[in-house]
Amino acid sequence: MAALCLSAAVLIQAPDAVVGQGIHWVHDLRHHHHPWRHWAAGRWASGEVPLWSRDAGAGFPLMADGQVGALYPPNILLGFLLPSELALTASLLLHAVFAALGGLSLGRQLGRSWSASALIGLGFSLSGFLVAHVTYAGMHAVAAWTPWLLGLAWDLSRPKRGALFGLAVAAVLLAGHPQVAVIALLGALVVFLSRVRDLPISLLWAGLGALAGLAVASPQLLATWELVGFSAREGGVDPAFAGMGSLPPWEAINGVLPRFWGWERPADIALTYVHKGAAYFGTGETHWEDLFYLGLPVVLLAAISLRRRGQWLWKGLAGGAFLLMLGRYTPLYALLRLLPGMDHFRFPVRFSLLLTLACLVLASGVFDSLEQERERLFRWSAVALVLLLGGGLAGLGLLPLVEGPLTSALADQPERAAAFLDGMRFDGSWGLLLPALTLATVAGLARWGGPRLRPGLLLVLALDLSATLYGYNPRLSPEVASPPEAARLLSTSPLRSTVVDRVQPPELDSQLMSASLGLLWGTRDVIVLSPLLLPRHEELLAVSGLDVGREHGIIKVRQLQENLDVARRFALGHVLTTHELGPGFELVREDGPVRIYQLLRPLGRLRVVGCAQTGGLPELLLADPERLAITTESVDLPCSLQASSVQLLEDRDELLRARVELDARGLLIVADTWYPGWQASVDGQPAQVLRVDHDFRGLVLEPGPHEVELRYAPSWRWTLWLWAVLGLLLGLFALTPMSWISRRGSEGSP
């Protein structure tokens, strides 16, 4: 019954999504997760494993970006059952329910009562961390597994639980966000080490389970690690980059008053690819990263727990997570970055995942002994109410004194100044209403609630979290996922299309088919917005003005016009933009503010060149022109090449076949991204794949007719058998009927 009530409490938050009338389609869900999952689902439906995408980034190992979750079984199943836009929304809903049930399970493992366990499940599923990170679907899925992982780590005394632990390890590594997966696994390690002294046998089952989980996830781990080694994050990131996304200490108030520093949802950002607008006037990176609202009842109960003896594990986990959230503001995060692999991440504030769960566990311990803490709960909630009202009124009184100096200090940022002042007015008026009502209700329940105290607190927590975070992730009609008219034109072209100046209002994203949206509708783009970008590819994009970058506007158009010979090398056929383009382009369509231009004299995706055509790019394009040499290896080509023909025979994501005929020795350039794992054969014989034109593939061919084949076959591909076979066996063993989820822990309350 508790599980059903929790599920209902979660699903009632999004009734339109439950019936398929609303879908999540803002920010990264639109730019990344939906198109990427659509691509992966299409590959699975074709009977192919989705490893490489020819249509993103001029060719990119898309599966290796952990956010795709291409090997995560729930994504595969939902991709088979539902259209991609409904599959993504269903995944978010189901993982929210799964998070609630995970919190319930964690509480039961710790020996909590059903009602206290429900507090953990309800508080976690509706928490600021889960709600704010809906925009990162992979992160949301990993977070949903975290309470299950911690609960299993608490007791690994039996082989069955070791198998379940291995399944959970594999799930967090496959679900779609490497950084949060590492955070979840670190939390599980801390929990496990706190218990292992009592149960030495658990070392065996924990080790076997963890190894099995790592083996199941090995294709994802090896693919991602390989991509990291060729990406901009190779060798780790510098301290300044790693410190991005640190929680400013003064913004810790977001745990109790999430609107104090402004209120800015991902859907509120006025321009695509911009992550912070004026409405969030805090000093953190984004509101949704710094939002870790716990709910005032949980904060009060957890604070009371700090006055009690015991529960050192959860107190330490909460304190350690909070210190790590501070990132660059504390030396602890610098020490953590010394661990292998930890120097590739930023946004340390995401450790709020562990803080949230630890605070809920602490609160649940007090919840189970409310009879002894009733008077303290009344006093603390009453004092908090007085401080809240007094602080709000004092702030309103000071507002006239700071309005002038603040406006002057932010004279060059009038929108930010206005947002700051409006936010202060809200904090001192309507912003006090809900927290004041919550605190007053908690105080009333503590004093006069009697037997209704526990169910009353659960109801207050649900209302507090739901009302405070209401509408944080607005949903749109499924019709927004319909293809634009431009897609019909561009999807029939064998050449690529792209966007010039992508920083535009979000309502133009579909028309521009920006970011990865082309994957939905069969067009091919030269960019991919992965955190693991390939530097050589990005250099070519930056030279030609086709990258996202920090600058936007007419400067991108100028870069493209001045360096059109570089852009042509991507096998571009069409360009979409809101600007007017000049020589080298022909306008073929206008759709409101969006123009579609056809590139004149385009270069084909497959082309043959001799010595006269292999000069490096003009030196004025880069400060270091030698980095744009035609090849990375010496190739002796005669100047007698007069005629050649290229016929494309087969063109799939991971396989390209062509018939090529030359009258002299030449270089076949395939305008797809060079990357390890691509193997070539010429007339059935292995051939070397060269890196040419800075970032493309090339093959040296002798005179005469040839059949050329390029196939993506990475060295780690054999581990897909481990994922399939071992994953199935582990799942069958772990998920056979058992009663562990409903059993109260034998240790009692920790």
Image: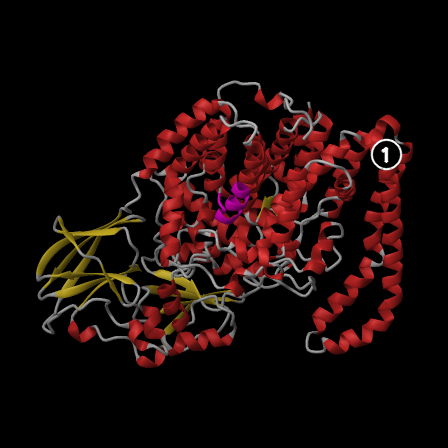
User: Toward the viewer: 523 or 287?
Assistant: 287
In the image, which residues are magenta? 176-186
Asked if one can make out residue 650 in the rendered structure from this viewpoint, the answer is no
Q: Which residue is mark 1?
A: 374
* Direction bottom: furthest residue: 620
What residue do we see at 47% from left, 66% from top?
548
* x and y, in percent, of residue 694 in the image: 29, 67
The relative height of residue 535 versus residue 305 in the rendered view (above or below) is below
Few, some or many residues within 10 Å of mark 1 (<14, 14–19, 20+): many
- Left/right placement of residue 136 relative to residue 443 reads left
Amino acid type, residue under disc 1 in the picture: Arg
Instruction: Examine the image and state in which quarter residue 55 appears.
Output: bottom left
- Left/right placement of residue 76 relative to residue 243 reads left
Figure coloring: secondary structure
* x and y, in percent, of residue 44 in the image: 38, 38
- Left/right placement of residue 585 relative to residue 314 reads left
The relative height of residue 110 versus residue 251 in the rendered view (above or below) is above
Whether 433 is among the magenta residues is no
User: Toward the viewer: 511 or 254?
Assistant: 254
Secondary structure at badge 1 equals helix
* x and y, in percent, of residue 63 in the image: 39, 47
Give the position of the C terminus as an image quadrant.
top right
SS assignment for the magenta stretch, majority: helix
User: Toward the viewer: 583 or 711?
Assistant: 711
Whether 177 is among the magenta residues is yes
- Left/right placement of residue 289 relative to residue 488 reads right
